[in-house]
Image (cartoon, coloured by chain):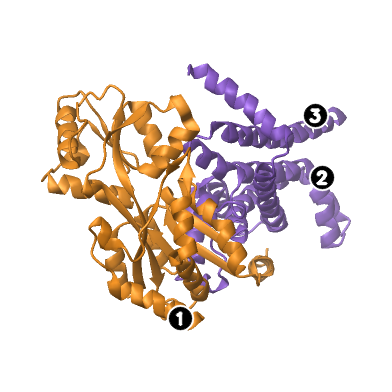
Chain colours: A purple, B orange
């Protein structure tokens, strides 16, 4: 078979599989979404408040903390996988939970990836706010919470970018979820781990089909983000 | 920023994650997690057995597809409930160390040495050691390559035994020797790309041939040597050392795979019409392996106690 034919055949079979609503592919996609969305949500729930606190307050060692968060934004997923594996292994400190090789373990690992991303981008958008806004709010002696809500509203585009970037990182990573999920069929097999497996076993059509779905998800996220940013840009 | 606020926030975060996880993770259904080899999974055997076992016992069966070395490592931490692997030496060491309570051979298949159609090292119709020796010689002269699993798997262990029998040293650093560090299918595909020789279990090779068709340009160049026999064993973990494992379900699987029905299922499994695995429980002498009377008695006592 000539090289290009493999591609063409792979793609045509892939579209057949996607259009046929293959239950196997559905389950894999659903798991990927469940894990990555949950991890993004939880990572944001902690990352946004913490990022806001760090960004809006002056304290000793602030630059240090920000540098650490920014470094963690680039933490390699395999390192996260290794750490979470050791935490959850029966011999490890959280072994009693018995959640290694479950979707929950995958969510936990991805929280370690999404949290720094959300936190870091939140910090930089809070730092980028106009200082006069904060001064104005303080001169009104508004309640702290109300002040925070106003400021967060002001940098909502940054927050959205943070959440989207975190989701993009989560849905496309393979190292961490492979290590703590174990790639078990119908249980912890996600899009990325399945692509690896099916490429290895020579089932290219299936791998390409999943690759297309993954690309579509990533594209959807980026498109939404771009549309919002462009709209916002027009209003300025 | 007051530091107590940060501490409070951090502990709230930890608690919330913890709560979410336990809330999600608690499920009462019966489960069994087997740590097994890439060959039993890639060949499709596990998928084939799964529905029969599940419907009979009502246990949700899942597995990790690892090399034998990794599978043993995972089990030695108590992170899996049962082992289905193929490296007798290390299985026995595992039991001796107190991590396992029993190893028993349940089925076998065989290894084949595969290589490019052209067979540049000219190794067909040789026995396994002579074949590997000739590949090494051809490798040194730059006319052949060898791809190794290089992942501590059972297949890798056999390869190292063959080199040892040849008294070969320093081959790992040679130009012609490529350590893939991956599973059987991936290693075969690498050998295919490099037009190299490799050692593979027959099951995975047939399965890959089936899925890749003509794109897989490797052929069997050496087979049938007794050295290439590949027996698979079940290893029960020591439940007193690992109180958290699902020992009862593990015993259920052991009894199932050694039962007449389970043995027949293994023998019935075919890929493109070829039989892949051959049942061998309680018949190990028939292929020249040591008899396992003690192990078989242990299993049969377990079976009787369950009745």
Q: Could you tell me residue B166's position as x and y percent?
A: 12, 44
Q: Chain of mark 3?
A: A
Picture coordinates of residue A227, whole percent (x, y) = 80, 31
Residue topped by disc 1: B304
Determine whether, in the image, residue A208 is placed left or right of residue A157: left
Residue for badge 3? A230
- The image shows residue B180, relative to residue B3, as above or below, that is above
Say which quadrant the N terminus of chain B sits in.
bottom right
Q: Residue placed at 47% from the left, 41% from the top? A: B271
The answer to whether B49 appears left or right of B90 in the picture is right
Q: Residue at x 51, y 65 (%)?
A: A88
Q: Image quarter for residue B176?
A: top left
Height in image: A188 above or below B42?
below
Q: Residue furthest left?
A: B167
Horizontal side, residue B223 vs residue A175: left or right = left
**Disc assigned to residue B177:** none
């Amino acid at each position: 078979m000539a090289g290009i034919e493999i591609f063409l055949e792979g793609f045509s079979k892939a579209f057949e599989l996607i259009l046929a609503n293959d239950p196997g592919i559905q389950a894999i996609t659903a798991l990927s979404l469940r894990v990555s969305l949950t991890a993004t949500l939880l990572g944001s729930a902690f990352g946004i408040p913490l990022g806001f606190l760090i960004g809006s307050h002056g304290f000793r060692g602030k630059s240090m903390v920000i540098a650490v968060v920014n470094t963690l934004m680039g933490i390699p997923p395999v390192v996260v996988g290794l750490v979470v594996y050791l935490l959850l292994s029966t011999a490890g400190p959280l072994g009693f939970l018995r959640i290694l090789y479950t979707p929950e373990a995958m969510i936990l690992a991805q929280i370690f990836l999404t949290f720094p991303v959300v936190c870091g981008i939140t910090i930089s958008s809070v730092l980028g706010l106009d200082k006069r806004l904060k001064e104005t709010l303080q001169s009104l002696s508004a309640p702290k919470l109300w002040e925070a809500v106003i400021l967060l509203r002001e940098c909502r585009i940054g927050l959205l970018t943070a959440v989207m970037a975190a989701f993009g990182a989560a849905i496309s990573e393979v190292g961490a979820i492979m290590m703590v999920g174990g790639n078990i069929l119908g249980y912890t097999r996600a899009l990325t781990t399945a692509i690896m497996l099916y490429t290895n076993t020579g089932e290219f059509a299936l791998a390409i089909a999943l690759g297309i779905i993954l690309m579509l998800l990533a594209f959807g996220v980026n498109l939404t983000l771009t549309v919002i940013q462009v709209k916002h840009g027009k209003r300025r | 920023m007051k530091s107590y606020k940060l501490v409070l926030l951090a502990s709230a975060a930890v608690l919330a994650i913890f709560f979410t996880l336990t809330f999600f993770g608690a499920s009462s259904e019966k489960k069994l997690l087997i740590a097994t080899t890439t060959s039993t999974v890639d060949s499709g055997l596990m998928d084939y057995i799964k529905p029969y076992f599940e419907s009979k016992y009502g246990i949700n069966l899942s597995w990790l597809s690892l090399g034998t070395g990794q599978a043993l490592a995972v089990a030695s931490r108590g992170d899996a409930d049962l082992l289905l692997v193929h490296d007798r030496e290390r299985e026995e060491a595992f039991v001796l160390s107190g991590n396992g309570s029993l190893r028993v051979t349940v089925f076998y298949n065989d290894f084949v040495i595969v290589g490019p159609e052209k067979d540049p090292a000219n190794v067909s119709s040789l026995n396994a050691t002579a074949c590997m020796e000739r590949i090494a010689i051809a490798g040194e002269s730059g006319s052949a390559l060898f791809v190794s699993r290089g992942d501590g798997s059972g297949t890798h262990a056999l390869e190292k035994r063959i080199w040892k029998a040849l008294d070969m040293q320093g081959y790992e650093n040679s130009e012609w020797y490529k350590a893939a560090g991956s599973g059987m299918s991936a290693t075969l595909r690498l050998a295919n790309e490099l037009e190299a020789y490799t050692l593979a279990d027959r099951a995975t090779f047939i399965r890959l041939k089936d899925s890749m068709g003509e794109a897989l340009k490797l052929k069997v160049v050496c087979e049938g040597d007794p050295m290439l026999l590949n027996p698979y064993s079940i290893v029960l973990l020591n439940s007193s050392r690992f109180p958290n494992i699902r020992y009862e379900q593990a015993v259920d699987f052991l009894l199932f795979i050694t039962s007449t029905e389970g043995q027949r299922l293994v023998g019935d499994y075919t890929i493109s019409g070829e039989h892949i695995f051959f049942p061998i429980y309680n018949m190990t002498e028939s292929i020249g392996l040591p008899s396992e009377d003690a192990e078989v008695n242990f299993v049969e006592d377990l079976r009787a106690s369950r009745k």
